[in-house]
Image (tube, helix red, strand yellow):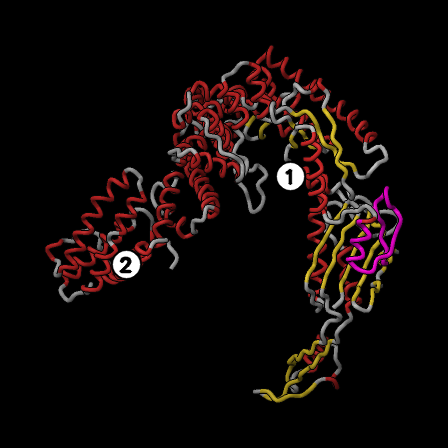
Amino acid sequence: MPELLIELFSEEIPARMQAMARDTLRKMVTDGLVEAGLTYGHAQAFSTPRRLVLVIEGLSTESPTLREERKGPATTAPEAALQGFLRSTGLTLDQLEKRDDKKGQVWFAVIEKPGRAAPEIVAEVLEKTIRSFPWPKSMRWGNGTLKWVRPLHSILCLLSDDTGASVVDLDIDGIKAGATTAGHRFMAPDRFTVTGFADYAAKLKAAKVVLDSAEREAMIWHDATQLAFAKGLELVEDRGLLTEVAGLVEFPVALMGAIAEDFLHLPPEVLQTSMREHQKFFSVKNPKTGRIEGFVTVANRETADHGATILKGNLKVLSARLSDARFFWEHDLRVVKTEGLEGMGAGLANVTFHNKLGSQKARIERIAALAREIAPLVGADPDQAEKAARVVKSDLRSAMVGEFPELQGLMGSYYARAQGLPEAVANACKGHYSPLGPSDAVPSEPVTVAVALADKIDTLTGFWAIDEKPTGSKDPFALRRAALGVIRLVLGNGLKWRLSTDYLVEIRGHLYRTKAPEILSAASPALIQQIRRSTNPMEIWEKNKDCLRDAEFDALVAREEYYAKLDEIARDLTSDLISFFHDRLKVFLKDEGIRHDVIDAVLAMPGNDDLTLVVKRAEALSAFLKTEDGTNLIQGFKRANNILTQAEAKDGVEYSFGADVKFAEGEAERALFAALDAAEAALAPAMQSEDFATAMAEMAKLRAPIDAFFTAVQINAENPIVRRNRLNLLSRIRQICQSVADLTKLDG
């Protein structure tokens, strides 16, 4: 079976697009071939800066002949129906067949689609792929209409088998498919002919082109680490940069240089960020001191002077870049030493956070007030938490963060230490953004936790209050990430956190700040600004309510109904926000291996706004269901619940009180009464202390008495008193089993 080799040779493809392009080329071509009737064994895509390559092994030589029978109208049908059928099949009347059917004779069309040769299909599929390739950005060149990420120079399209290789006949805007390609732009630029993938890969390697990006990454990492090791240093791991650099070169050559002494006093993160962002250099550190003392750059060619000229040019550019970084660092330190971090951040009053939520300065005031309230809950000093909250955003006004936004928070920690602020404040500057993602570490230092929670809570409640919630896949303000951050902070630190209470207060405040001033349109601008900026707008409102009692405002503002309306909105928004948290919590717990129905069962219980409580319940129930006792008890509960539910529906009453052991008629029934009494006595303290594992263990003891009860007793006894007593007994089973979770939510 033939092998298909495709190479699309162009000017340099941006490194960030290459992985997507490889996958897209493989998918579009293979999907097109299969849709056309061809089969294949294996497909693999490769990329270098100047080429996209696809090799398909085991391709069938032609598509099969297809025979389709299509039923048409009755032979007595109107002429219009017959003509429509003929048009849909592409046949003439003499090509149709008459066949007997249940209601008479009908027309049948037998349509044969002959198979096509692989070269014809490949040409068709590849042209469609090239013309519709979904590059993030593409361009046109010359006078043609073809679009590609960069000008496309040549197409190699070769079908080869045991008898030889043949070029697929393809011409796209004057670019004809051939059997030639070119090697390295500088070291082997001449074109050469290939006969198949093995020949292609071997000749490319000889022409100084490493085709596989994974192989280029391995070469870069090996050579760079060896260069660092030879100097007694270590290469700083950066997988993202490694992938990017491998997409910039076809033949990687690692070169190592030293950073000038003038720059070694800069923070390591500044050196690393500057070199990575501007120069695509790997950082090399001294393992003894932790300082960044060198760099590794990757050239795209071998040179006679072993890279000395390349290294010299890079050092010159690097020196200029690091001089800028040093200037930013020294400038920021001067500001901190003269004005402090709060002085550095004073300009945030003129930076808008959101047009409906005020400035960054107003937001900081809210976060500081909230961090002070949260501090006792997480074991932090309230004064220190408030102080930290007032300075954690200050580095947004620093020159360094202006140049390198990814260093926000980190630079604040350096500046806090330079000012002599407590270490807890410095750590909060760096850690309050965390956790940023599923793999990011969760802060545990109390002050950092308090500020991080306050930051995320203000974000969530603020955007909920102005109705800027995530919709579908759109989440421009990263609210899903903020919610997951709150979940991980609460769970990671074992906090008791009631969302409904705390979030209601915050949302109410946002509503008074945002919606109230819109209604007070004729009030003084100073009062409106005071309400918007305040951390307690309700208090300001109450103090100024009397002066607003004129004809225009009496119907809106001074009436208690308006306050009640805002509170109602706040409650609805809080409920909606908690539901949003539940959705994020479901995703989090599923990743932890907890079933979706288990999560639904615990979320149906009271107190579901306490994240730690929900997770404790879910973990206990999940573990319980994996045991034999757990499975059997659930079956007993389901049987009791089904019988009880049917009886309540039939009788029109609720059996939930009055089961008395004196009406028990057998040992099994009396044993169940005793077991339920013991379970209730043991469950009460376990539930009080939220020891759900113990509660589940006590519930498991009910398995045997319940099984024995159902074996020995008929629930619907002839004596109505006995029947009612037994139904009330089933109600006790349901109540006890439902104490940890709503078991009716479990699958099955």
Q: Is residue 506 magenta?
A: no
Compare marks 2 and 1 and give the one earlier in the sequence: 1
**Residue 636, label in figure:** 2
Q: Quadrant of residue 655?
A: bottom left
Q: Residue at x 72, y 78 (%)?
A: 112
Judge whether residue 203 is colored magenta: yes
Q: Is disc 1 surrounded by few (<14), some (14 to 19) or many (20+) residues within 10 Å?
A: few
- The one nearer the camera, 231 or 281, is 231
Highlighted magenta segment, given as a residue range: 178-205
Residue placed at 30% from the left, 55% from the top? 629
- Give the residue type at disc 1: Arg
Residue 563 appears anywhere in the view: yes
Check disc 1 and report the residue beneath it.
239
From the viewer's perspective, is 266 left or right of 2?
left
Number of the label disc, if any, that sits on residue 488 = none
**Percent x, y of residue 415:** 58, 18
Residue 401 visible in image? no
Badge 2 marks a residue whose secondary structure is helix
Please say if 624 is above or below 15.
below
Instruction: Determine whether, in the image, residue 713 is placed left or right of residue 473.
Output: left
> Alpha carbon of mark 2 to alpha carbon of mark 1: how far?
54 Å
Q: Nearer the viewer, mark 2 or mark 1?
A: 1
Few, some or many residues within 10 Å of mark 2 (<14, 14–19, 20+): many
Q: Amino acid at mark 2?
A: Gly
Q: Quadrant of the N terminus?
A: bottom right
| Residue 498: % across, % down | 38, 35
**Residue located 58% across and 28% down the image:** 353
